[in-house]
Image: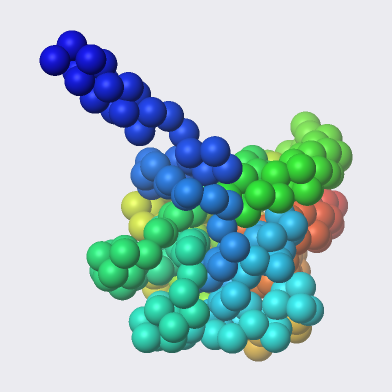
């Protein structure tokens, strides 16, 4: 009997040990992800996650993305399984992924839960600061067995970030309205990654206090906030027409001093290493604005 108990105990202990070659991480939802082996078939459920996986050296393991997964160039050839807001479940299952990477605040929670109930492993991501970008690179490198590449990319990102921060250190704070879209009128609050970029460039988000991550506004709210700078996004590489629409209100400080600027959304609204290109532009724009005030 004693021998039997020892045998059972040994089996339990062995079961508790990590599987050789296995991977165990904790995602941004606090969920433990256990993989018997590094992921070889990954589906990214947001364009920025596709980009992060490639940056982490795991592009070869990505078997699908969603619409607008267009960077780097090789990502354009990936099949799409819907967009970030609606998935083609049958197509996902047919691709037999061993890991899905989801966006907590962008993907519909119910749709992600359905995928998980179908037995798929889901890693949830939610970068909220610039340090989170490098941290996420390393996390993705771990699950894809490209950790050395990912750590190099993370170190490079952190070094470039420090240089940009040093250039903006000690500058006068400017009040900024960041406009994501015009109809409906959308901005970001203080918890959004874009607010972190603004802060490090010497900007103060005039709508940082709002509770929602991407709140909707009316024009009167912007007029009351009276920002010194307006920075527009849009949907391409050229300033949107609606940026100039603010000139109808010459009482706005941003209009009076001609502080209406644009940063391409791909360089500021994706939580990837390219956000430092957007940060550099934004810092330069705020420097121009200070010279006018």
Q: Quadrant of residue 202?
A: top right
- Residue 47 image offset from top left, x and y in percent: 59, 72
Given residues 245 and 237, the one toward you in this image is: 237
The answer to whether residue 255 is above or below residue 188 is below
Q: How many marks?
A: 0
Image point (60%, 75%), residue name? 63
Q: Quadrant of residue 220?
A: bottom left
- The answer to whether residue 178 is left or right of residue 201 is left
Q: Residue pushed farthest top?
A: 2
Protein image colouring: rainbow
Given residues 195 and 258, the one toward you in this image is: 195
Whether residue 248 can be seen here: no
Image point (75%, 83%), residue name? 238
Given residues 191 and 15, the one toward you in this image is: 15
Image point (48%, 83%), residue name? 81
Image point (36%, 82%), residue name? 89
The answer to whether residue 79 is above or below residue 152 is below
- Residue 7 image offset from top left, x and y in percent: 27, 22
Given residues 218 and 124, the one toward you in this image is: 124
The answer to whether residue 183 is above or below residue 56 is below
- Residue 284 image offset from top left, x and y in percent: 83, 55
Q: Residue pushed farthest left?
A: 1
- Residue 183 image offset from top left, x and y in percent: 46, 84
Q: Quadrant of residue 154?
A: top right
The answer to whether residue 258 is above or below residue 210 is below
């Amino acid at each position: 009997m004693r021998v039997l108990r020892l045998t059972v105990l040994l089996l339990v202990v062995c079961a508790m040990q990590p599987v050789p070659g296995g991977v165990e991480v904790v995602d941004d939802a606090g969920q433990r992800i256990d993989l018997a082996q590094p992921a070889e078939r990954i589906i990214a459920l947001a364009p920025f996650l596709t980009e992060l996986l490639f940056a982490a050296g795991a592009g070869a393991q990505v078997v699908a993305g969603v619409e607008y997964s267009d960077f780097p160039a090789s990502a354009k050839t990936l099949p799409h399984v819907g967009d970030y807001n609606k998935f083609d479940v049958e197509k996902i299952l047919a691709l037999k992924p061993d890991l899905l990477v989801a966006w907590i605040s962008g993907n519909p929670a119910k749709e992600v839960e359905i995928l998980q109930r179908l037995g798929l492993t889901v890693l949830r991501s939610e970068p909220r600061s610039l340090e989170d970008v490098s941290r996420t690179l390393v996390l993705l490198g771990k699950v894809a067995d490209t950790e050395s590449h990912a750590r190099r990319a993370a170190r490079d990102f952190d070094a470039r970030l420090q240089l940009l921060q040093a250039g903006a250190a000690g500058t006068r704070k400017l009040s900024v309205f960041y406009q994501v879209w015009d109809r409906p009128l959308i901005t970001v609050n203080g918890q959004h990654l874009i607010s972190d970029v603004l802060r490090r460039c010497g900007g103060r988000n005039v709508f940082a206090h709002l509770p929602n991550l991407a709140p909707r506004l009316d024009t009167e709210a912007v007029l009351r906030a009276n920002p010194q700078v307006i920075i527009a996004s849009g949907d391409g590489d050229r300033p949107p027409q609606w940026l100039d629409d603010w000139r109808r209100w010459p009482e706005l400080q941003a209009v009076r001093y001609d502080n209406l600027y644009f940063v391409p959304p791909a360089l500021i609204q994706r939580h990837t290493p390219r956000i430092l290109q957007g940060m550099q532009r934004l810092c330069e724009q705020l420097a121009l604005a200070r010279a006018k005030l």
